[in-house]
Image: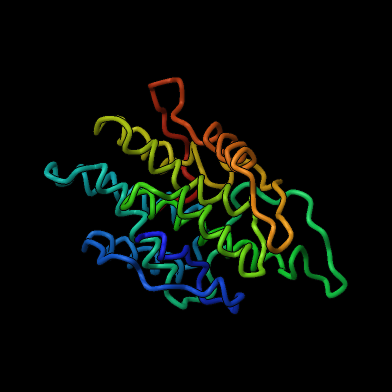
Amino acid sequence: MILGFLLAHGAFGLQAADQPLSPPIKFPAEDERFAVLARDLQARGWSFDDIFAKLCRTALTNAQANPQLSIQDEARSIWGGMWLWTCKTIEPLPLFHAGGFGNLHATADGKYDHGYDLVTLQKHYAQHFIAGGMFEAYFDMGRKAGVQKERLNSVTGDYFDYNKVAVTTMGARWVDVAVEGDAQHAKRWLELWSSGRYSLSKSMPKLHWESLPPFVDATPERIKAVEDEVDAAIKFPDDQNITPTTQSKAH
């Protein structure tokens, strides 16, 4: 079962429950090309937002150059590519600023909730975001896999983190919106993210949700409330005419 494959956080000295796993499927060659591009941009010092925008621009370019390509499949390949990129032991992963943090509780050693520093927290959220999109793109279960991962953490003595549910939902929601319509709809969605009008940092709600003590499970009502808030933030615009904004870099 796909739920046997837990969401990965990457090999960053994390807890035992957070160790990465090999990809659950053999990804298409197109996904591999997106992974290579992401690694190249990372090596050039690009931010997470800028890498994601470039992957969206590349998907648009590929679909325009080859009419036989499905633009929805190109959108899915972005997520397979990011999974392949970040499941490898690559340091440093660009920081994931989506949403920002809510209230954090400092500990005596200068770290925060559950003993993590801010950089490690961002790495956790980046990996959950990517896994949510990848599981949704290829298995239609990004949200379910994310909740299952947190529940497994809880019963093994770790904790259930609603913020991680939020970022996995964000990845899954992005994919759902991208592929819910026709090719023109997918094109418009990619244009939003490639142009800078939408970005991870601007579109994700602040990560203000709580975590639970070890061995305490989440309620379905609370999980749904978190997912609903993210779904409401990541949506196709009411206006159908997209005017690309000035990009932050001349990529």
Side of 110 where 246 appears, left or right: left
Is there any visible trace of residue 80 in the rendered image? Answer: yes
Question: x, y percentage for residue 40?
Answer: 38, 68
Q: Quadrant of the N terminus?
A: bottom left
Seen from this angle, which residue lies furthest top? 239
Residue drawn at the location 46% of the way across and 21% of the way down: 238
Is there any visible trace of residue 191 in the rendered image? Answer: no
Q: Is residue 90 above or below residue 114?
A: below
Quick one: 28 or 8, which is closer to the camera? 8
Residue drawn at the location 36% of the way across and 40% of the way down: 190
Question: x, y percentage for residue 105?
Answer: 82, 59
Side of 215 where 110 appears, left or right: right
Quick one: 179 or 5, which is closer to the camera? 5
The image quarter in which residue 164 lies: bottom right
Question: x, y percentage for residue 251?
Answer: 40, 53
Q: Is residue 246 above or below residue 248?
A: above
Residue drawn at the location 34% of the way across and 32% of the way down: 188
Q: Is residue 71 above or below residue 156?
A: above
Q: How is the structure coloured here? A: rainbow
Residue drawn at the location 33% of the way across and 68% of the way down: 36
Seen from this angle, which residue lies furthest left? 68
The image quarter in which residue 32 lies: bottom left
Q: Count how many numbered circles sit on residues in the image.
A: 0
Question: x, y percentage for residue 223?
Answer: 60, 43
